[in-house]
Image (spheres, rainbow, N blue to C red):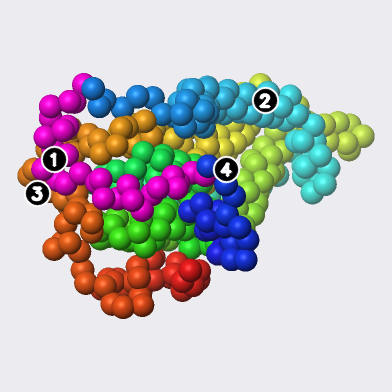
Amino acid sequence: LLSRSSQVLVGRAPPGRARPAAPVLRSSGRANARSRVLTCSQTQERTTSTETADAPAAGPLASTDVFFDAIKHASSSLELAGVARFLGVSIVCVLGAYSLHPTLLQAVADFWDLKPGSDASFENSFFSLVGIIYGLLSGNTFLFLYERQVNIVQELYGEAFALELLLQQTFLAVDDPEVRAIMSKSCRRYIREEMYMPTEMSSPFTPDSAFVEIVGHVVEEQTLGLDVEGLKEAAQKLADAQSRRSAVAAQVLPGMHWVFLHTLEAIFLLCFLVFDATTGDELANGVTQMVAVPERQLGFAALTGVLVLTSQVLHDLDSPVAGLYSFRRSLDLRLQYVIALLDQLEGSARGFIPPELVTLQRLGLVGAFSSSAEMPSTAKPRRKGRTGRADQASYAGGPLHMWESAHGRE
């Protein structure tokens, strides 16, 4: 399945089948077009002299990609929905606790046969003990979940930086506009399926993953004779960043932890009712009738509201991609430059390099634009009969090696 999907990605027909005559994503004269690749100096001169003429237009994929537009408009609505949910649930629980307090108090008194004026010192001590245990448990839970979310955001920032490096190397190593558009589409899919769903702890090397699709494009460029050393290193950095982020996201609390926490909340409220059951009046026939005291009703309602609000905050932190504590807004801001690079990559002319990338290239901070057709001295020697595997030895164990092991050579 992986081999067949990769053949569809690179525009080849499966073995034993004729390639369709209709145009595919990659142009038919692809190999001959490599001889027209611009060198580093030519690209810089062209970018400097015709910067306005070669400015990238809006790419076709940028106008049809609804996901990123929806993310921008959904951040504020998610925050409003989270605030409404927090306040709505808390207000309903507070009002319910205030109105049900006399009924619950009478039920507790009848169940344990509590008499007004009885000694409640044991209940008072137990109530204090449960409060201390719940405070320690909920506080440690909040600290664990908050630190986990901070660590996920840090790893996502590193993953965004690795993706920027990959896009920059794509500008430098690939000049075909169609191939650039294909790579940009794969990177957009990676952002959707990986970075905006960071708690999905799946391996990046699964057959249908976005990362395997990106690596497949890199392998195809290598088989065509291009120098993709920078792309390979950038893909390796992206895989490492994804692995670190998945390791942080895997730090989840077990289900029994939440059961224990909510059980303590129920016991806390029950202890309050037991301690409060000594305020009733005993009738002449021996029946105890609890009296509704507004002050105690307010206390019970306030305690219920605090417990419900604390529980909502903890569950909101347990889901980093939704709710008030979501990091979507921070991730949106961090990915603005990445989205701008993707738009330029999709709509750019042949050989176009962004001005800021040209500056970094002149400073020697990024690799030079080269191709095996025009700059043979920079390419590593290839062994006979092993086309496309010239530098596998220096990259053993990396994502390309795993991808080629799964696919086999065509």
Residue 265 drawn above or below residue 46: below
Please give the range of residues in magenta.
24-52
Q: From the image, tell me which residue sits under label 2.
A: 92
Q: From the image, tell me which residue sits under label 4.
A: 22
Q: Secondary structure at mark 2?
A: helix
Residue 126 drawn above or below residue 400: above
Is residue 35 on the magenta stretch? Answer: yes
Is residue 281 on the magenta stretch? Answer: no
Q: Nearer the viewer, mark 2 or mark 3?
A: 3
Question: Dots 1 and 4: beta carbons under 8 Å?
Answer: no
Q: From the image, tell me which residue sits under label 1.
A: 42
Res. 254 image quadrant: bottom right
Instruction: Please rate how many residues cluster around mark 4, counting C-alpha atoms within 10 Å: few if below 14, some from 14 to 19, many from 20.
Output: few
Residue at coordinates 44% horizontally, 45% vertically from top-left? Answer: 27
Q: How many numbered marks appear?
A: 4
Q: Nearer the viewer, mark 1 or mark 4?
A: 4
Residue 300 drawn above or below residue 124: above
State how far apart marks 3 and 1 are (Cα).
16 Å
In-front residue for pair 117/246: 246
Residue at coordinates 9% horizontally, 49% vertically from top-left? Answer: 364
Marks 1 and 4, the one that precedes in the sequence: 4
Instruction: Kindly tell me whether residue 288 is visible in this rendering.
Output: yes
State how far apart marks 1 and 2 are (Cα).
69 Å
Q: From the image, tell me which residue sits under label 3.
A: 364
> Disc 1 marks which amino acid?
Gln
